[in-house]
Image (cartoon, rainbow, N blue to C red):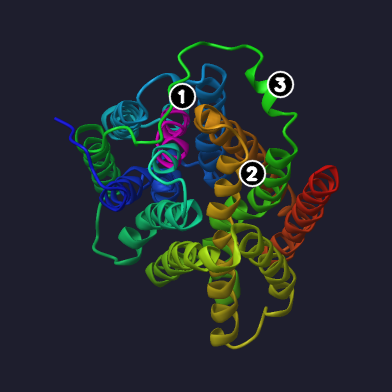
Amino acid sequence: MKSSLTASSALILIVIAQFLGTSLWFAGNAVAPEISLLLNSPGILAAITTSVQLGFILGTLVFAFFSIPDRFSPSDVFFFSSVLAALFNLLIVILPIHLGVVLVCRFMVGFFLAGIYPVGMKIAADYFQKGLGAALGFLVGALVLGTAFPHLLKGLDLNFSWKIVLWCTSGLAILGGALVGFFVPDGPFHKINSKFDLSLLPKLSKIRALKSAASGYFGHMWELYTFWAFAPVLIVFLRGNEAMQSSDSLLSFFVIAIGGISCAIGGVFAERWGSKTVAQFALLGSGICCLMVLLVAGSPDWIWIGLLLIWGVLITADSPQFSALVAQSVPAEYRGTALTLVNSMGFAISIISIQVAQFLLKWLQIDQVLGLLFVGPLLGILFFRFYGSSLALKS
């Protein structure tokens, strides 16, 4: 039975649960090479990634439209979403292997991840009125580590069956759901919005502070998941290999996972300089890394590996700060809906970016394709500042 917790204790449990639950996110990517061989279907990485993203978009739209995180206990939503996402992840192992089954199951994993990632942020926001940027820094850091975890399993070269990867990530997700569902009560600043309001989403769209934070987040999302999805491909290209090796998976893990550390450190910096400053700095820095990757092909390993690690640091540090700005821009009873809605739109943008990248690979090299991602950070900074300046002038 749930009992009262201090904010710091609740955050620790939410962070652990977020890591365990979001290990499902890229589990399909980690086993994509084996599934491709089994199905004799090369090049399914983009399809598997997109299926999860599409499911997440639909899930967040449904959760936002019905204001589920605000109308019901977010801890319960997190628990049931974790269990259902884990079960659909396991169905890939249980059911006869078929591309349609894989894509549908990954879609449903994405759908129920909508009740894990943004709802986890909502629970944290209900515990912290002050220091939300730092709290979300640790929380999103856990998401990043969870996303990278399947690459670690592959990179350790322990001769795991691809089925073991899916079993492990599903078990971890259920454990994470139980931690929140049974041990984390609703926070002291949780406010229930019990009624269903069809006019809520149009109302939120008129809040300029929300549009400012969302704009920066959208620029960030144009870059983030495309970089994560194609980081292994980029590493193979820069190494000059023809096929992916275990060392490439291990480096992919470090490139992604290092962003979890930067999220936490960025949250600490946000306490001193503010979420806005940290978010803008990281978004600008990751945009510069997009352009720098065009220059490192054929360079010594330490140069391009160093660049990818720096890129991994900067590309995630802005995410929790934009989310903190989103949460702070709306009344407490609408936080869950606002976070879920902005997540939904951001992930829709990420799908477009991934598909554009896959399309451009027909004509361009992977470093050139990822170099073009700088457009996202550039537009994100411009619109973030535009809406922020408009708000300042209005006030």
According to the picture, the residue beneath numbered tag 2 turns out to be: 350
* Residue in the picture at 24% in, 37% down: 174
In the image, the segment drawn in magenta is 105-121
Q: Which residue occupies 54% across, 28% down?
A: 334
Left or right of 344 in this view: 206: right
> How many dots with numbers?
3
User: Which quarter of the rendering shows the C terminus?
Assistant: top right
Name the foreground residue: 142 vs 213: 213
| Residue 350 spot, x, y in % from top left | 64, 44
Answer few, some or many: residues within 10 Å of disc 3's Cα (few below 14, many 20 plus, some between 14 and 19).
Answer: few
Instruction: Specify whether residue 240 is in view.
Output: no
Image point 68% across, 43% down: which residue? 214
Which of these two is toward me, 228 or 138? Answer: 138
Q: What kind of residue is marked 3?
A: Pro
Q: What residue is shown with label 3?
A: 202
In the figure, is residue 322 to the left or right of 23?
Answer: right
Q: Is residue 176 above or below residue 257?
A: above
Task: Look at discs 2 and 3 and give the one toward the viewer.
Answer: 3
Q: Pick the quarter of the image with the N terminus.
A: top left
Position of residue 129 measured from the top left corner of the image (x, y, whole percent): 46, 45
Q: Quadrant of residue 305?
A: bottom right
Give the number of the disc on residue 81. Answer: none
Residue underneath mark 1? 70
Q: Mark 2: give few (<14), some (14-19) or many (20+) Cα within 10 Å.
A: many
Q: In the rendered view, does 364 fall on the left or right side of 128?
A: right
Q: Amino acid at mark 2?
A: Ser
CA gap, disc 1 to disc 3?
A: 17 Å
**Disc 1, disc 3: CB below 8 Å?**
no
Whether pointer 2 and pointer 3 mark residues with C-beta atoms closer than 8 Å, the reply is no
Give the mark nearer the N terminus: 1 vs 2: 1
Q: Earlier in the sequence, mark 1 or mark 3?
A: 1
